[in-house]
Image: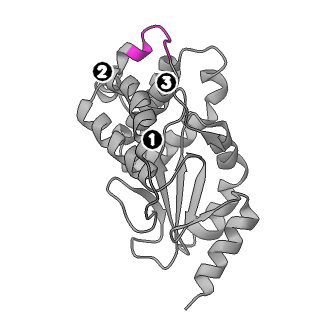
Amino acid sequence: MRSNKPFKFSAPGFAQMSRRAAITGAALATMALAACGGKTGGAAEGDMALGAPEGAKVTVVEYASVTCAHCAQWQKDVWPEFKAKYVDTNKVRYVFREFPTAPVPVAAAGFLVARCAGPDKYFDVIHEIMASQGEIFGGTPPRTVLLRIAQGAGLSEQQFEDCVKDQDATAALEKRIKAGLDAGVTGTPSFMVNGTKIADSSLSSLSEAVDAALAAN
């Protein structure tokens, strides 16, 4: 699990491309100092979800970052089987909550692009960014990678630019981050089943918690 720590990111041109996204890093550090325990169950503003509708018997919440290597590994190794077993069958409501990790400007911009792509393409964009971490951390300019993914989702370059500079959208993201911190999230990926944190993100541990919740009266 990757924890959130203050950082500085100064890739040429990228921080300037989304100034409020850069500010989010400082906001994370500040809000973490005041974070306290909170409820993680139930719907929250801005939730992106798949599977069963709101009000389902079992809700699985994942707090993750598109720049988190452990999150990307989970998406690759565990998500396909978890999705087939519980999400595609509508046994659970799977909720993805955005929790940027370093480099936060890149993660924040990625989340903004996913939202601009629209609900139908949101998860495709999220998964594509995670799958492209090798490029992002391997020397390819993050802007190049995110622009390519944005264009693949149907956004023009101008729409991409407008998206990552949208102050209202970034402010909304910061509210979602604070909600996660208030809920006690300190790193990614973090999973909750009906509001109870699951220490192990393996399929076996998640299945044990989900199956128990499904079987409960």
Q: Could you tell me the amino acid type at mark 1?
A: Leu
Q: Few, some or many C-alpha atoms within 10 Å of disc 2 (few <14, some 14-19, many ≥20)?
A: few
Residue topped by disc 1: 33
Q: Which residues are magenta?
A: 9-15
Find the distance from the CA under tag 1 to the CA under tag 2: 37 Å
Q: Residue at x 39, y 51 (%)?
A: 179
In the displayed image of the protein, which residue is found farthest to the left? 168
Q: Which residue is mark 3?
A: 148
Cα–Cα span, label 3 and label 1:
36 Å
Sequence order check, earlier mark of 2 and 3 = 3
Which class describes the residues within 10 Å of circle 3: few (<14), some (14-19), or many (20+)?
A: some
Label 3–label 1 contact, CB within 8 A: no
Residue 53: image quadrant is bottom left
Q: Are marks 1 and 2 in contact (CB under 8 Å)?
A: no
* Rendered location of residue 114, percent (x, y): 42, 39
What residue is shown with label 2? Answer: 158
Q: Position of residue 121 (x, y in %)?
A: 43, 45
How would you rate the neighbour count of disc 1 (Cα within 10 Å): few for under 14, some for 14-19, many for 20 or more? Answer: few
* Residue type at the position of mark 3: Arg
